[in-house]
Image (cartoon, rainbow, N blue to C red):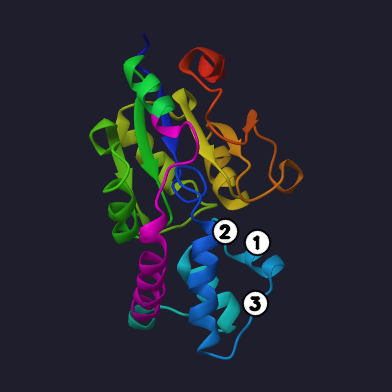
C-alpha cells in the first residue's frame, strides 16, 4: 500500500458519459439565439472547455462578468434538467475507485464544470467520501489546458505532481495534466486516440482496470 500516490479524475466523460447531454443543452441554448453548431464544432470547441471559452467562441465575442454568469446558469440548468434522469457512472468506475482507495491511493476530482453539476453527479454516485480533493470551475482563475486545477489538486492531496495519475478525456484536459507534469490515462469516451495528445495509457471504460494493473504508471 502506497499512500503517497494519487489519482485525479476529470468528471465529464471520465466519471460519467455526460457530453451527449451537454451537447443537447448547448443546442437548446444556442437555438434560442439562432445558432446551430455542428457535431464537429462541438467536438472541437466544447468537450473539455470552460463555459467562458465555449460561449465566447460560438457567440463570436468575449462573454465575461455578469453576462457569463447569467448565460452559464441558463445553459447548466438546461443540462442538469436533461441529464438528471440518466445519471450513471462509466462502466466499472465505482469498483475501480473503491479498489484504488482500498490500496491507499488518494483520490480527487478536478472538473471544468460548476459545483452545481458536480453536486448533482456526486449526489447519485456514492464516491464523495472517498475524495480528498474536489475542484470545480469556481476554484480556478485559469482553465484547462492551464495546469492550475491539477497543480492545486495535488497540493490539496499533499502529493507531488509526479506522484499523480490523471484520468482525462479531452485534448485540453490531457494537456492540462501533462502541463502539470503528471501521468495521464486517456478515456476514449468523447474522442479517438488519434484526436488526443499522447497518453501513458488509453481506456474505453474501467471494467478491466485495477490498482495492480495501473500501479506501474506511478513514478
Q: Which residue is mark 2?
A: 47
Residue farthest along the right direction in this orientation: 194
* Residue ID at (50%, 43%): 14
Q: What crowding class fits label 2: few (fewer than 14 Cα within 10 Å), some (14-19), or many (20 or more)?
A: many
Looking at the rendered structure, the secondary structure element under dot 1 is helix
In this rendered view, identify the residue nearer to me: 160 or 112. 112
Prevailing secondary structure of the magenta residues: helix
* Residue ID at (39%, 20%): 99
Q: Which mark is residue 43?
A: 1
* Residue ID at (32%, 16%): 102
Q: Is residue 215 above or below residue 70?
A: above
* Residue ID at (47%, 31%): 92
Looking at the rendered structure, the secondary structure element under dot 3 is loop
Q: Which mark is residue 77?
A: none
Q: What crowding class fits label 1: few (fewer than 14 Cα within 10 Å), some (14-19), or many (20 or more)?
A: some
Residue 98 location, x and y as percent?
Answer: 35, 24
Q: Which residue is mark 3?
A: 37
Mark earlier in primary sequence (3, 1): 3
Horizontal side, residue 187 vs residue 160: left or right: right
| Quadrant in the picture for residue 94 | top left
Is disc 2 in contact with disc 1, using a CB cutoff of under 8 Å? yes
Q: Is residue 39 above or below residue 18?
A: below
Q: Specify the segment rendered in magenta.
A: 68-94
Q: CA distance from mark 2 to mark 1?
A: 6 Å
Mark earlier in primary sequence (2, 3): 3
Q: Is residue 106 visible?
A: yes
Residue farthest along the left direction in this orientation: 129
| Quadrant in the picture for residue 184 | top right
Amino acid at each position: 500500500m502506497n499512500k503517497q500516490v494519487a489519482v485525479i479524475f476529470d468528471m465529464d466523460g471520465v466519471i460519467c458519459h455526460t457530453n451527449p447531454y451537454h451537447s443537447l443543452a448547448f443546442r437548446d441554448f444556442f437555438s434560442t439565439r439562432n445558432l446551430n453548431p455542428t457535431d464537429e464544432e462541438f467536438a472541437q470547441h466544447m468537450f473539455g472547455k470552460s463555459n467562458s471559452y465555449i460561449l465566447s467562441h460560438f457567440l463570436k465575442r468575449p462573454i465575461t462578468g455578469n453576462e457569463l454568469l447569467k448565460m452559464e446558469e441558463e445553459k447548466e440548468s438546461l443540462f442538469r434538467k436533461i441529464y438528471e434522469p440518466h445519471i450513471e457512472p462509466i462502466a466499472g468506475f465505482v469498483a475501480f475507485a473503491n479498489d484504488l482507495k482500498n490500496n491507499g491511493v488518494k483520490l480527487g476530482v478536478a472538473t471544468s464544470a460548476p459545483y452545481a453539476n458536480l453536486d448533482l453527479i456526486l449526489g447519485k454516485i456514492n464516491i464523495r467520501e472517498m475524495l480528498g480533493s474536489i475542484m470545480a470551475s469556481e476554484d480556478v482563475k485559469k482553465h484547462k489546458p492551464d495546469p492550475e486545477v491539477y497543480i492545486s489538486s495535488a497540493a490539496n492531496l499533499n502529493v507531488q505532481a509526479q506522484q499523480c495519475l490523471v484520468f482525462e478525456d479531452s485534448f485540453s484536459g490531457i494537456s492540462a495534466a501533462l502541463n502539470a507534469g503528471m501521468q495521464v490515462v486517456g478515456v476514449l469516451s468523447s474522442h479517438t486516440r488519434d484526436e488526443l495528445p499522447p497518453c501513458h495509457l488509453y481506456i474505453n471504460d474501467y471494467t478491466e482496470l485495477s490498482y495492480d494493473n495501473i500501479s506501474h504508471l506511478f513514478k
